[in-house]
Image (cartoon, helix red, strand yellow):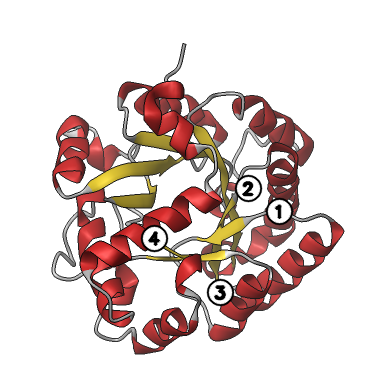
Amino acid sequence: MLVDSHCHLDFPDFEQDLDAVVERAGAAGVAAMVSIATRPREWAQVRAIAERHPSVLYAVGRHPLHAHEPPRSEPEALLDAIIAEAAHPKMVGVGEAGLDYHYQRESEPLQKADLSAQIEASRRTGLPLIIHSRDADADMAEILTREHRDGPFQAVMHCFSSGADLATAALDLGFYLSMSGIATFKRSDALREIFMAAPLERVLVETDAPFLAPQPKRGKRNEPAFTAHTAAAGAALFEMSADAFAEQTTANFHRLFTKAAGALSGAGEAA
């Protein structure tokens, strides 16, 4: 059974057929999925989805592309809000946090302040940080290395598509790399080489649904059921059977997201 370690089930793309989407995921062998909140004002909606569906877990944070949006709370308030939300049994991670210089270079100071606050939230809660990094490899590697030295935390480099240097820096810190549909694209040979060089026990799979549908679904709306296609590509990379790769990446997920097993067993149902 697979785990989609990163999707966005609250996005409008799923508004009309969310129940069917979750059902198709289960039919495709996806036993669990983590729906990621990207703005504080959306946390309640993501939480409600997790409460309604036994196989859905969730994470909360502030995405770097939303760092500049009003009303903007200070990083300290963001930190406190995440810590409070972590009391919910199905809240299993912090983020999506990070840096994105591709679209929002002008908000760099705000992005960095939010990233630091969410790193501290990860430390205090013991929940893994879910990292978004785009066109920011050098800054991201420097910040993660410095922050980890100041106080350890765990993390996953979500939808990893950056360079080998950032992959090495993350793996050296004990972090995980998450494989998305990008790894199935024809022109992603360099990315596939990065994953092949990574320790198998530090690899996760995800969809980032509704974005980045893998081959052979590219161009369509992505959904958690399509984790199976990315996992098939991952199994081929590591020269493993699909079942063995699913078993390993699911074990990896539970090693990182330590709160997930209790939530999925029923202990995590909201009161």
**Residue, far right:** 150
Q: Which residue is mark 4?
A: 249
Secondary structure under badge 2? Answer: loop
Which one is closest to the eye, mark 3 or mark 4? 4
Please state which of residues 86 and 198 is positioned toward the viewer in this rendering: 198
Please report whichever mark, 3 or 4, sits nearer to the chain's N-terminal start.
3
Q: Which three-letter amino acid code belongs to the residue tagged 1?
A: Phe
Q: Disc 4 residue type?
A: Thr
Task: Tell me if 68 is positioned left or right of 110 in this view.
Answer: left
159 horizontally vs 121: left or right: left
Mark 3 or 1: in front is: 1
10 Å crowding of disc 1: few (<14), some (14-19), many (20+): many
Q: Of 42 and 126, which appears nearest the observer?
A: 126
Q: Where does residue 14 sit, x and y in percent of width and height? A: 24, 38
Q: Is residue 172 visible?
A: yes
Q: Which residue is disc 3 drawn over?
A: 135
